[in-house]
Image (cartoon, rainbow, N blue to C red):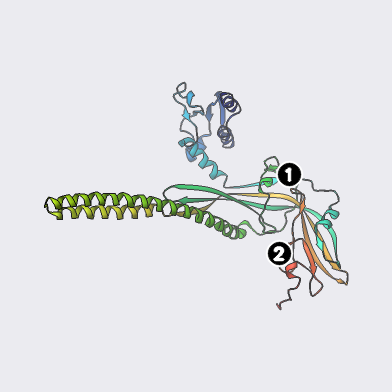
């Protein structure tokens, strides 16, 4: 255990690394006086803006509690301390919106046309022709929502969701997309960007999807909270029931001695009133409230290959349908194509009643008049 602690101290904890990165980002300087003890100098405008660090010229920060006696003027930095809370809050404020580029992807895969033809399932009589392959930037918006569940206790959850703005579909490979080894602030190559809606236009759809997830989490927490509250109420009812039983024993003894029993009525009313108030207060404090807000947004521009293609029916050579395909170099796979009729994603195309390519759902569906 001691060796593990010493290795962690030598390499630096994630919190310590965050502190050094934060000071560097705001334009400050950080000097390591001794292991886990730093002298920090930040620009005056930064201190005046948010008071994140100190009003002094130099601040000494210690990540090791045992170093505080040797450095009485140092501030202890650990999770939950006011200093780190202010830094985390300011870092979240600074990083609420950011942009990045994905670099280092292979934009010239081997035998691309053959791999695409093997993935797409075309009905007999349909022929796919790839006319043009063009690399473009496809914008991916990553939203981090913060859900806060408030009852007799407070819990928070971060819910990330990524959406391809070109297709409007959710990105399933979020971990690979956020690989820090590929993300940079500047692009390695300059490409045009594929047509897409704005982030503001896609936001209501994303938020509605997150709301469904939050509702499911709230229902689960609500059931657990209700069960816990009912157990507490049952214990409370038993407690006040015991008080009434003790009062009944005192009443019987007083009756046997011939005493006036009216003096016990206020005590019984006080027990009943206190029970009602405490049960009502417990139910009120245990009411679950949910707050949802957008915490951070990251816009990632990832290069993909846009393939302008046509699908031709061999029985009707003049009947051609344009089909745009997208090859994702990050996952080295073909994204689902869009059905020309219902706009649903699909890898399977069949002939409909007008000898046009369509997904299986539209295969036998008659054309509706416009």
> Is disc 2 placed on a helix, strand or loop?
loop
Q: Residue 349, how many percent across, how many down?
A: 79, 65
Q: Quadrant of residue 178?
A: top right
Marks 1/2: CA distance? 30 Å
Q: Residue at x 45, y 47 (%)?
A: 154
Q: In the figure, 226 relative to 186: above or below?
A: below
Label 1 crowd (10 A; few <14 / some 14-19 / many >=20): some
Q: Is 279 on the left-hand or right-hand side of 11?
A: left
Q: Is 70 on the left-hand or right-hand side of 304?
A: left
Mark number displayed over residue 103: 1
Q: Nearer the viewer, residue 274 or 291?
A: 274
Q: Residue at x 22, y 52 (%)?
A: 248
Q: Residue at x 58, y 34 (%)?
A: 14
Disc 1 versus disc 2: nearer the observer: 2
Q: Which residue in the protein does label 2 denote?
A: 344
Viewport quadrant of the C terminus: bottom right
Q: Residue 97, how many percent across, how many down?
A: 59, 48
Q: In the figure, 350 relative to 291: above or below?
A: below
State which tag comes first along the sequence, 1 or 2.
1
Q: Residue 150, how many percent across, how many down?
A: 45, 51
Q: Nearer the viewer, residue 48 or 19?
A: 19
């Amino acid at each position: 255990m001691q060796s593990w602690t010493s290795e962690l101290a030598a390499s630096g904890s994630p919190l310590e690394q965050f502190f050094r990165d934060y000071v560097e980002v705001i334009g400050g300087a950080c000097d390591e006086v001794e292991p886990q003890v730093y002298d920090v100098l930040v620009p005056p405008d930064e201190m005046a803006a948010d008071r994140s660090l100190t009003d002094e010229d130099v601040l000494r920060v210690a990540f090791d509690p045992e170093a505080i006696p040797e450095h009485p003027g140092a501030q202890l930095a650990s999770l939950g301390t006011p200093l780190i809370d202010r830094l985390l809050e300011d870092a979240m404020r600074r990083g609420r919106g950011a942009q990045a580029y994905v670099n280092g992807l292979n934009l010239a895969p081997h035998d691309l046309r053959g791999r695409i033809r093997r993935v797409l399932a075309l009905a007999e009589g349909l022929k796919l022709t790839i006319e043009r392959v063009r690399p473009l930037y496809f914008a991916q918006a990553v939203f981090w929502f913060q859900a806060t569940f408030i009852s007799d206790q407070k819990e928070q959850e971060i819910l990330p969701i990524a959406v391809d703005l070109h297709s409007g579909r959710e990105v399933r490979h979020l971990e690979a997309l956020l690989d820090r080894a590929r993300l940079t602030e500047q692009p390695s190559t300059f490409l045009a960007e594929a047509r897409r809606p704005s982030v503001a236009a896609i936001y209501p759809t994303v938020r509605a999807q997150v709301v469904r997830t939050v509702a499911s989490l709230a229902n689960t927490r609500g059931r657990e909270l209700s069960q816990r509250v009912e157990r507490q109420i049952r214990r409370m009812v038993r407690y006040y029931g015991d008080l009434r039983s003790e009062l009944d024993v005192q009443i019987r003894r007083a009756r046997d001695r011939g005493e006036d029993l009216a003096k016990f009525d206020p005590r019984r009313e006080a027990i009943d009133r206190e029970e009602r108030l405490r049960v009502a207060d417990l139910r009120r404090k245990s009411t679950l409230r949910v707050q949802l807000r957008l915490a951070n947004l990251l816009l990632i521009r990832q290069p993909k290959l846009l393939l302008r293609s046509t699908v031709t029916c061999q029985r009707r050579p003049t009947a051609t349908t344009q089909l745009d395909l997208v090859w994702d170099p990050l996952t080295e796979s073909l994204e689902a194509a869009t059905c020309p009729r219902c706009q649903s994603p699909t890898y399977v195309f069949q002939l409909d009643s007008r000898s046009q390519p369509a997904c299986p759902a539209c295969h036998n569906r008659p054309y509706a008049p416009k």
